[in-house]
Image: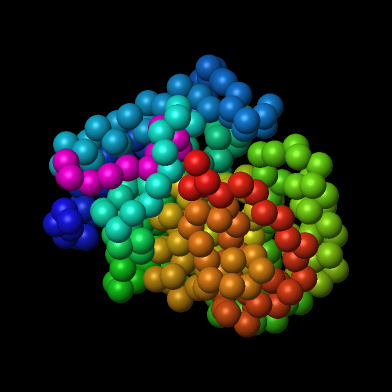
Amino acid sequence: MANVEPQECLSVALKLVKQAGDLVRDAIKKKKNIEMKSSAVDLVTETDKAVEKLLITGLSSAFPDHKFIGEESVAGGEKCVLTDEPTWIIDPVDGTMNFVHSFPYTCISVALWVNKDAEVGIVYNPILEHMFTALKGQGAYLNDEKISASGETDLSKALVFSEMGTSHDPEKVDTVITNITTLLTKVHGIRAMGSCTLNMCHVALGGVDACFEFGIHSWDTAAAYLVVKEAGGVIIDTEGGPFDLMRRRVLCASTQELAEKIAKLLKQYQPERDDAH
């Protein structure tokens, strides 16, 4: 197996992510060349492609033995397979719909997984200059300041992020509406901001107490997973079992107790797994 020094990997990746952030920052106010992927709300821009190319080119030059899972590479036909080998998992622009509308809740997500576990996590919102970082066993940080989840356990006091998602599948739409309706009178508040990655990071930051989503992908959660974990938060499957990176569902919360309370209320939905092909 390729040798991995997490601190070195973090340092190299951070430089590249900052360069990629310049591309996003320069492009967000400009007219975009927008393409549709799976539906009219599942979008990709030339910036998504340019950022992913910059990151994969730079990381593969520094770490030639490492593998990659990139959102646009998978959209282009590459397999989405996670092995024990060091694997960089990249979402070049999470919150593409926000980016297309110049709404500044969007980010670059880069994670390094080894032996099917996260070692390095970087989530960068270049518009608001929010840089979330985490190394396994070393805590989570926002702009070099240590962060921690809120510790909230009371459902009635919890601010919860949920999302509409990028699918118009009737079953998925019904699931989204049912879950929001169920939770609306039980939690303190519900918000939908348009980026699963940033939603999870704000649970790590303590500003949000929980978030959940169906239909996301491994690249949406791979980096934020470590940020949340290192901030003392909890990540589980929406049904309450262990989190599975490839299952395309996530529930994260400030505490195990709160996560379990929410899981018991959710109507479940199972999209096709990322590694199904």
In-front residue for pair 15/58: 58
Q: Quadrant of residue 92?
A: top left
Q: Is residue 261 above or below residue 113?
A: below
The image shows residue 249 at horizontal and vertical percentages of 60, 57
Q: Is residue 261 above or below residue 176?
A: below
Q: Is residue 56 above or below residue 115?
A: above
In-front residue for pair 254/118: 118
Residue at the extreme front: 277
The image shows residue 241 at horizontal and vertical percentages of 59, 73
In-front residue for pair 1/264: 1
Which residue is drawn at the image coordinates 30% and 58% (left, top)? Answer: 84
**The N terminus appears in which quarter of the rendering?**
bottom left
Left or right, residue 205 beside residue 98: left
Which residue is drawn at the image coordinates 23% and 46% (left, top)? Answer: 66
Q: Quadrant of residue 255?
A: bottom right
Which residue is drawn at the image coordinates 41% and 27% (left, top)? Answer: 49
The image shows residue 145 at horizontal and vertical percentages of 35, 65
Count of number-bearing discs: 0
Is 42 contained in the magenta span?
no
Q: Is residue 24 visible?
A: no
Q: Is residue 200 visible?
A: yes
The structure's colour scheme is: rainbow
Q: Quadrant of residue 179?
A: bottom right
Which residue is drawn at the image coordinates 16% and 60% (left, top)? Answer: 5
The magenta segment is: 63-74
